[in-house]
Image: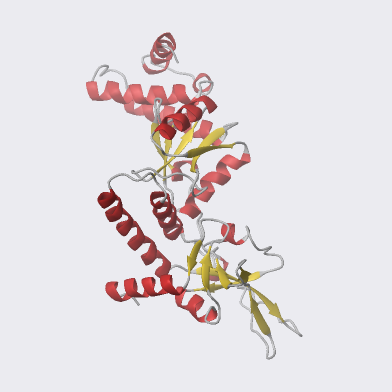
Amino acid sequence: MNEERKDEIGRRFLLTPEISQEELGGLEIQELIFLVHTAKRFKVEEAFPDVYLDERIKGITGVLLDKIKHADTLYLACGKTTGYPYVDGEDRVWMFSQEAYAANAEDYFRQQQLMLEMKPIGGEEVLRTFGEFHILGLPKILVDNGQYHIELNRDDIMPPPDWTGTPEISVPVTNPGLQRAMIRFFQTLHAPTGDQEVRGRELDVLEAEMLDEILQARYLLPMQLKESDPSPADEQGIKTLKEGTVIQFGVLSAEDGSAWLPAFTDWLEFEKVYDKTVWSSNIAAYDDLLAVSGNMDGIVLNCRGIPLPIDANNQERIEAFRQKRGLK
């Protein structure tokens, strides 16, 4: 955007008493961000006291949110090592409104040894992605980093689901705190090494956050029921098993012959591996996973996401953390 264009839209949409919402909607996302940025600067500088800048900022931001919801294509920055949205030091996901902006950012941060992959999303995928941000525990989005940029709240684009009045058994299992903690820990673990002491302290903090979430989480455990005389579920989805019913839990076999109990933080992760029309699930706490996997080599969380194997060594580490923190 050149200076002439900035001056044109600044005068038209910030200094003109009346503006057309239809005309405002014809601007590009980057132009709308520029207007919000400039209006905020005018407000701080008290440059145009006769202009109702708060109202103008609110109106432009509303149009911006709508443009993002209905964008033909946006670009989501993902970490190459995790495959999940990159989360910066201020807990923000990065999105870009144009391919050129995404490419510039990817190239710039590659030179800083931060390897990103820009994933294009468009159409219905945009709102679906913002819905996934709820599942991943990612509440903030930075749009167009490296250009005129703006930080937006996920909930202003995709409000959280309202489960008021829904029976607990019908509320989908999610663990946004654990997903976020895993993203941040493994993203940092694989990040370019700087000051080893500083990095070590940061990893200690992130690991503690992740272990705390592991102990608090409720997991989806894939299983199948073998019933000679299947019993129906009641109106709340609760099923009473009859004598002789066999419960078969999912098992993953590694190339070395080891056997692992798969567990998942949410249905999004579950369905990367299991067809939920064939496999049902049991909701389990961490200690339940330990009990079920007693004769196996360990547990693996989100095996096709950011996989976290919990073998005997990691179980000892988690137990030591639990004892140190006095957790149940």
Which sits in the foreground, 209 or 37?
Answer: 209
Task: Residue at 45%, 77% (x, y): give it.
Answer: 287
Residue furthest to the left? 45
Quadrant of res 146:
top left
Determine the residue positioned at 30% across, 58% down. 205
Can I make out residue 232 in this image? no
Q: Residue 207 in the image: x percent, y percent?
A: 35, 60
* Image quadrant occupied by the C terminus: bottom left
**In the image: residue 112, left or right of residue 294:** left
The residue depicted at 26 percent of the width and 50 percent of the height is 198
Residue at 28% across, 73% down: 324
In the rendered image, the vertical position of residue 157 relative to residue 297, given as above or below = above
Q: Is residue 244 visible?
A: yes
Residue placed furthest toward the bottom: 243
- Residue at the far right: name it: 228
Image location of residue 120, percent across then percent down: 58, 36
In this rendering, would 227 be left or right of 155? right
Name, please, the residue furthest toward the front: 256
Position in image of residue 175 (x %, y %): 47, 61
Question: In which image quadrant can residue 263 be found?
Answer: bottom right
Q: Nearer the viewer, residue 260 or 272?
A: 260
Q: Dividing the image into 4 quarters, which one contains the N terminus?
A: top left
Q: In this rendering, would 146 be left or right of 239?
A: left
Total marks placed: 0
Query: In the image shown, does 190 or 39 lie closer to the viewer?
Result: 190
| Image coords of residue 131 (percent x, y) | 53, 48
Depicted 180 relative to depicted 169: above or below: above
| 35 to 306, vertically: above or below | above
